[in-house]
Image (tube, grey):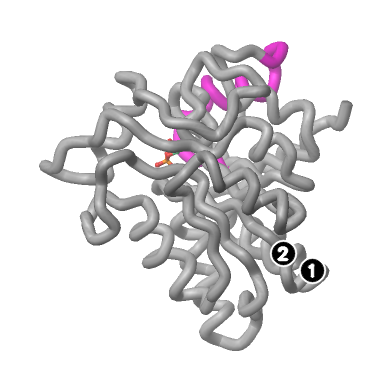
Amino acid sequence: MVEPTLRVFPDAGALAHAAADLICAEVRAKPEAVLLVATGNTPMPTYAELARRAAAGEADFGRVTAVQLDEYVGVPEDDPRSLWGWMERAFVRPLGITRTVRLSDPATFDAELRALGGIDLAVLGLGPNGHLGFNEPPSNPGAPTRRVTLTPASLESNRAYWGDLPVPQDALTAGMPVILGARRALLLVSGEHKREILRRTLTEPPTPEVPASFLQRTPLTVLADAAAAP
Ligand code: PGA
């Protein structure tokens, strides 16, 4: 078993800078890297820093493939709640990425990823309930790419993204084997409200009740700000 690396930063800005450094190093080493890309609030400063570097010519994502981690069911692409739309606005377009894998059909998604050789780097957030993507608790390490019904905890945390619009009840998620099979994973965690779930993720024996805890068995780097550090 590999011991996860935990790096703690004074604030979310320093965390974003370090995360951008790691992502850029991966892409320099392998320009055609396949990246699994989370949405959510936590990675946004990291993506903004990557966009800045791309615009300044300091980084080139032209051969990278960006893979969608999760999506609501029943939300068209032009709906403000589309997670694909969020990923396009925050990551794909500003980084100049032209190769993408969308999660719209679980039946073809895993085959597409296999054809690409799997995920090189997964950039992940941590759900307040320990979910990974929308692998809601309980999810075992074999839980496939599939449609799920969101838990009350995720409906509540996702409400913060969409103002007055209702949070869709169902979602598609990349399966646990896709995420856990990444050659490397970065888990970005910021804020006091994540401290307890991060402690459980890293220190409790891996359990389906905290899907992210299975990352303990993978090549994982956790980047946390001081407020989230256990
Ligand atoms: P957040 O979401 O980055 O907005 O906290 C993380 C998640 O729910 O996976």
Label placed on residue 203: none
Tell me which segment is drawn in magenta: 188-206
Give the residue furthest to the front. Answer: 107
Classified by dominant secondary structure, the portion drawn in magenta counts as helix
Residue 98, by quadrant, is bottom right
Which amino acid type is shown beneath numbered disc 2? Ala
**Rendering coords of residue 194 (x, y %):** 48, 29
Camera-side residue of 22 and 32:
32
Q: Quadrant of the C terminus?
A: top right
Q: Which residue is mark 2?
A: 33
Say if mark 1 contacts mark 2, CB within 8 Å: yes
Q: Is residue 88 above or below residue 115?
A: below
Give the structural element (helix, strand or loop) at label 2: loop
**Rendering coords of residue 206 (x, y %):** 69, 16
Task: Classify residue 219 as left or right of residue 72.
Answer: right
Can residue 193 be seen here? The reply is no
Camera-side residue of 101 and 128:
101
Q: Is residue 208 above or below residue 96?
A: above
Q: Residue at x 42, y 30 (%)?
A: 147
Q: Which residue is mark 1?
A: 30
Task: Classify residue 154 as left or right of residue 91.
Answer: left
Give the residue furthest to the right. Answer: 1
Using the numbered discs, state the Cα–Cα distance from disc 1 to disc 2 in whole angstroms: 5 Å
Task: Classify residue 73 as left or right of residue 38.
Answer: left
Residue 18, by quadrant, is bottom right
User: Is residue 230 found inside the magenta-colored segment of the image?
Assistant: no
